[in-house]
Amino acid sequence: MDYIDYYKTLGVSKDASPEDIKKAYRKLARKHHPDLNPDNPEAGRTFQQINEAHEVLSDPEKRKKYDQYGKDWKHADQFEEARRQQSAYESQAGYEGNPFGGGQHYTYTGEGGDFSDFFSSMFGGGGGRKQSRFRGQDIHAKLEITLTEAYTTHKQTFTINGQNIRITLPAGIEDGQEIKLAHYGGPGVNGGPKGDLYITFGIKNDTNFTRKGNDLYCDVPLDLYKALLGGEQIVDTLGGKVKLKIAPETQNGLKVRLKGKGFPVYKQEGVFGDLYVTWQIRLPTHLSEKEKALFQQLSEER
């Protein structure tokens, strides 16, 4: 990967303040936005470079890694871990002085320098030295599914870093829940194991239910006559329709509990929360003269 000087891209110095970086980014973003430069085929690429530079330099942690490692900043954690382990190895092996051996010191210069030479000397097996194996980096990703999808155990295919991954998602996954897929992360070094993949789930509600833990809540309209005289009412659940008996003189806002008709409990086969139905009594409209007279008569009787 070619080295890109993010400071030069934004036109700021290396000691620029966060405010200076933000100001420079906004000015350049407006100037090179593709929508404002429809006749310039290079505008899109320039705009992308500006966004990339701002993303790194506006984040204190990313900027610190970029200042130290240049184009290899994304591998900073792996590099530091490699340096710690190599230092420990050479200490045990009796090396003195520079823990990396050979009197070599690696310092990023900011002009295309990288740490590939360091990794080559460390892991390349030069001089008969034992090659070190290092675990790959962990990857964190977010996957969005619907509440309906989370209700059932199903297979899901998604792509991360160009790799298609197909997994079985157990029913009952919650919004913000994180699961770990071992050895689906970054590649190891010198045959070391892959890192892990951590997926955080976002649940989009595509239903009329409100979820609280494993319980579901919903409002169901009920006509006045059925509320007064009683009867039966069909109610939708995520598992299908159910028929409920309506007691005479049911009051508006009455909450009814349907045990086991809520959301499935994560990794507990056949175990569900409850569904709470709140009756919302609907008053009749567009009354005929006869209906109005009957209601008047009822009012007088009461």
Image (cartoon, rainbow, N blue to C red):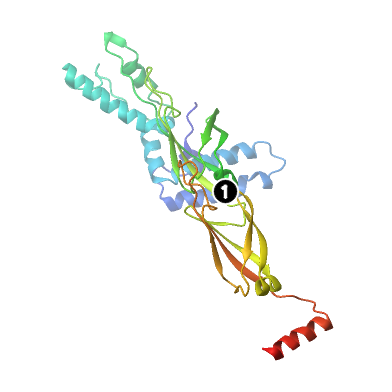
Amino acid at pointer 1: Leu
User: What is the x, y in percent for residue 91?
Assistant: 18, 21
Left of 23 or right of it: where is 45?
right
Q: Nearer the viewer, residue 223 or 90?
A: 223
Marker count (numbered): 1
Residue at (27% x, 13% y) in the render: 130
Identify the secondary structure beneath mark 1: helix
Residue closer to the observer: 27 or 114? 114
Image location of residue 29, percent across then percent down: 58, 47
Residue drawn at x 50%, y 27% is 2
Percent position (x, y) of residue 118? 34, 21
Q: Residues within 10 Å of mark 1 (few under 14, many from 20)?
A: many
Q: Quadrant of residue 48?
A: top right
For the point 58% across and 52% down, the residue is 205
Q: Which residue is mark 1?
A: 147
Q: Is residue 132 above or below residue 164?
A: above
Q: Where residue 291 sits: x, y (%)?
A: 80, 81
Q: Is residue 167 above or below residue 226?
A: above
Specify whether residue 140 is in view.
Answer: yes
Whether residue 11 appears in this view of the structure is no
